[in-house]
Image: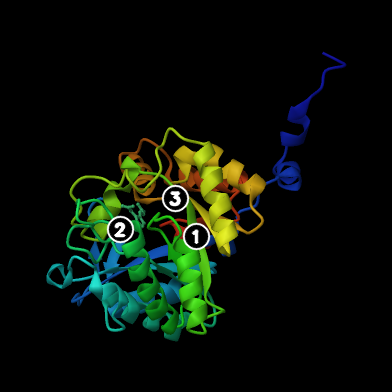
Amino acid sequence: MTGLDRPRRLRRTPALRRLVAETTLEPRHLVLPMFVADGLDEPREISSMPGVHQHSMDSLRKAAVEAVAAGVGGLMLFGVPRPEDKDASGSQASDPNGILNRGLRALVQEVGGSTVVMADTCLDEFTDHGHCGVLGSEGGVDNDATLHRYIDMAIAQAETGADLLGTSGMMDGQVAAIRAGLDARGHIDTGILAYAAKYASAFYGPFREAVGSSLQGDRRTYQQDPANRREAIRELDLDLAEGADIVMVKPAMSYLDILRDVADRSTVPVAAYQISGEYAMITAAAQNGWIDRRGAVLESLTGIRRAGADIVLTYWATEAAHWLS
Ligand code: PBG
C-alpha cells in the first residue's frame, strides 16, 4: 500500500517512541500520602492496601527519608489518633501535640529542606462521628461552624512548618476562611492545596480502614455527586477566587474528564489524587497475577498526567520514583 498515512512509522523503535512521547512522568511529579498513628511502636500494614502502612513516629521518618532519596516531589501526611482521643469537634486536630501535628514536625525536621511537606487539613480522622466537620443541631454537618475549626487546625499545622495545607473537607468557603486565618497570624507563606473537585466516591473504602474512620453513613451532603461535571468548574472558580495555590481533583481514574476540564481552566498548578481504592484494585489484580503490576501502575500514572495533572498523589510514589530514575 502506498500513499497511506502511516502513524506506525513513529512507533517502530524504542528511540523513535522516546523521541515523540508527549507525556512525561518524573519522580518530582509524585507525592506520597502517608499515615502516622498514635501509640504505635511498629508500622502496621493496612490490610486493604497491601504495602501501605500506618506508621510509628520512627517508621514515618524512615519512610520519608526513603521517599526523598527516591526523588518524590512531596509528602502528604494524615494522622490517626487513638480512638479514645476522638471527640465531636475533633479537638486533637488543632492540638499542637496531636498526632498529626507531631508527625508534621517530625517530617519538617527530617526532610523539610529537601521535599514539600503537606498536611491534610480536615477533621474526619479526629471526630468521633467521622464526619469532615462538626455537626449542627439537625445532625448534618454545619458548614460555618466547621470553618472555625479548620482555621484553628490550619494555624496549628502552619506552626509545625508544613509547606502546604490540603483542604480536603469540601466545606463552602474553606479556602477563603483558612487563607484569612493564616494571614491574620502572619503565616503568609503557608500555601493551600485546595481539593477543588472532590467526589463522594466508593473508592475511598480502604482509606477509611487506613485512618480508622468512625464514619456511619456517607459524605454526600458535602462531597460532589459523581454524576456532575459543571459543578467541578464552579468549585474550581471558587477556590481560585478564594486564594488556592494549587488545586486538586479526587479521585483520579474515574474522573479524568474532570481533571482535563480543570487543567484547561486553572491558572494554578493542578494535582490529582490516585486514591486508596485505585491502589487496592491494581494491587489485588496484580497479586492474583491478572495484570502486570509495574505496567499497570505506570500506565495509570501516565494517564493521570496526560489528562492534565501536574502533580499526582499516589501510594506508589516511592516505588514509581525508583522505577523512573
Ligand atoms: C477525608 C479524606 C479522604 C481521603 C483523603 N482525605 C476520604 C474521605 O473523604 O472519606 C481519601 C484518600 C484515599 O482514599 O486514598 N478528609
Element under label 3? loop
Determine the residue located farthest toward the top in the rendered image. 1
Indicate the amino acid at tag 3: Gln
- Please tell me which of labels 2 and 1 falls first in the chain: 2
Vertical relation: 203 (above or below) 71: above
The label on residue 43 is none
- Does the closest atom of ligand 1 sit within 8 Å of the Cβ of label 3? yes
In the picture, residue 217 is in which quadrant?
A: top left
- Horizontal and vertical percent position of residue 229: 51, 36
Q: Are marks 3 and 1 in contact (CB under 8 Å)?
A: no
Residue linked to disc 3: 274
Image quadrant in which the C terminus is located: bottom right
- Horizontal and vertical percent position of residue 16: 76, 42
Mark 3 Cα shell of 10 Å, populated few (<14), some (14-19), many (≥20): many
Residue linked to disc 1: 194
Residue linked to disc 2: 132
- Horizontal and vertical percent position of residue 277: 34, 46
Determine the residue located farthest toward the front in the rendered image. 137
Residue sitting at 43 percent across and 32 percent down? Answer: 227
Q: Where ligand 1 lies, by quadrant?
A: bottom left
Q: Is residue 311 visible?
A: no
- Does the closest atom of ligand 1 sit within 8 Å of the Cβ of label 2? yes
User: 99 left or right of 178?
Assistant: left
Element under label 2? loop
Q: Nearer the viewer, residue 248 or 142?
A: 142
Vertical relation: 278 (above or below) 175: above
Q: Nearer the viewer, mark 3 or mark 1?
A: 1
Q: Nearer the viewer, residue 88 or 122?
A: 88
Q: Whole-Å distance between the Cαs marked 3 and 1?
A: 16 Å
Residue sitting at 25 percent across and 45 percent down? Answer: 218
Vertical relation: 197 (above or below) 99: above
Q: Nearer the viewer, mark 2 or mark 3?
A: 2
